[in-house]
Amino acid sequence: MKIALLGLPQSGKRTLFSLLTGREVSDHRGEGESIEGVASIRDPRVDIIAGIARPEKIKYAENKIVLCPDLAVGTGKREWLDAARRCDLLCMVVRAFTSDRVYHPDGSVDAGRDRGILTTELLLADLELIEKRLERIEKEKKAGKTAAQVKEEQTLLKCRDAIEAEKNISTLDLDEEELASVKSLNLVTLMPLLWVYNVDEDKIVSSPDEDGDVFAVSALIEKDIMGMEDAEERREYLEALGLSSSGLDRLNAAAYDKLGLMSFYTMGKDEVRAWTIRKETAAPAAGGKIHSDIERGFIRVEIIRYDDLLAAGSEAAVKAQGKALLKGKDYVIEDGDICNFRFNV
Ligand SMILES: Nc1nc2c(ncn2[C@@H]2O[C@H](COP(=O)(O)OP(=O)(O)O)[C@@H](O)[C@H]2O)c(=O)[nH]1
Ligand SMILES: [Mg+2]
């Protein structure tokens, strides 16, 4: 999964990028340049499974993070979106922290205003693409139009009307055929999106807006947490702030949810590892994430439920309780399943 970090200058994109990827980035990047990094998803279930299995290696699932260029409002430049169009999820970082030392391009901190600006810029970017494409179709049509062009044109006109009425295209509930007809345009307002408010440390708990699509992180708190090696220390620190998990962990979880993803695990003496799949993935395809041979030669999968492992305390104890399950090719993997695939090629 690839996540784009986008926003106005000085909103905290670079800081969040560094926290997520462990990669320091200069504040003076080339114009229009985007930077990619990899973020390990610190998944507490991996730690707990590893605590039981005591493997040589632990491997978390990973997200690719793309730090996109600043939005330069009112310039009509669209480079800030180029890399984001190739991502799976847009994370719009909005400044809500106050600081005398960090300037704001608009002179004051107003998250609602900035969210409006970003929303408008996304709509304008799509409108521009749609209009260009409509002009081309108009020209191409002169040579006789195909059914595909007619469909595309109809869909684009529908989208244009929505944008001109300041409505998001995603509210149109386009059907699959319509979506396919405009897919190649990579419209940003059709992409899954999360609003990430970068708030002051003392506002992190009281932020009223937190729901599925909007939530608060404090880059400063995240920095503190990152500095703590010890999981127990992190937990106590978060607890003292009234938080159950770090903002970055919540961000990863929200991104998973938004994209319909989930994790399953493999557990062995050599390695405990998290794997990312779409919800509703059948066992052979899930195994295919590990190796194509597993999918091709799939026989069965042995499943231990995470909760059962936790309750029993060891793999042997789960098995002794008769709770290890053998499933066939039609089994749909559930979130948290610990899988041991049997295959033969
Ligand atoms: N006080 C405070 N400063 C922050 C916070 N997040 C980022 N900053 C500072 O704000 C400035 C701009 O942040 P940066 O991550 O470079 O923003 P970008 O331009 O959106 O990439 C930097 O000096 C950061 O150290 C925060 O949550 N609180
Ligand atoms: Mg900057």
Image (tube, rainbow, N blue to C red):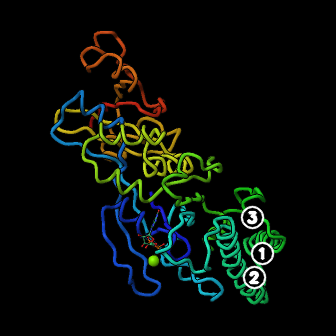
Check if mark 2's residue and mark 3's residue have beta carbons within 8 Å: no
Which quadrant does the C terminus fall into?
A: top left
Amino acid at circle 2: Leu
- Disc sitting over residue 261 in the figure: none
Residue at disc 1, secondary structure: helix
**Circle 2 sits on which residue?**
134
Gap between marks 3 and 1 measured at Cα: 18 Å
Dot 1 amino acid type: Glu
Q: Position of residue 105 (x, y in %)?
A: 57, 80
SS of the residue under disc 2: helix
Quick one: 233 or 323, which is closer to the camera?
233
Q: Report if the CB atoms under discs 2 and 1 are less than 8 Å apart.
A: yes
Q: Is residue 240 at least partly visible in the picture?
A: yes
Asked which quadrant contains residue 239, the reply is: top left
Q: Residue at x 61, y 79 (%)?
A: 107
Q: Which mark is residue 153?
A: 1
Q: Quadrant of ligand 1?
A: bottom left
Residue at the disc numbered 3:
168
Residue at image position (39%, 61%) is 64
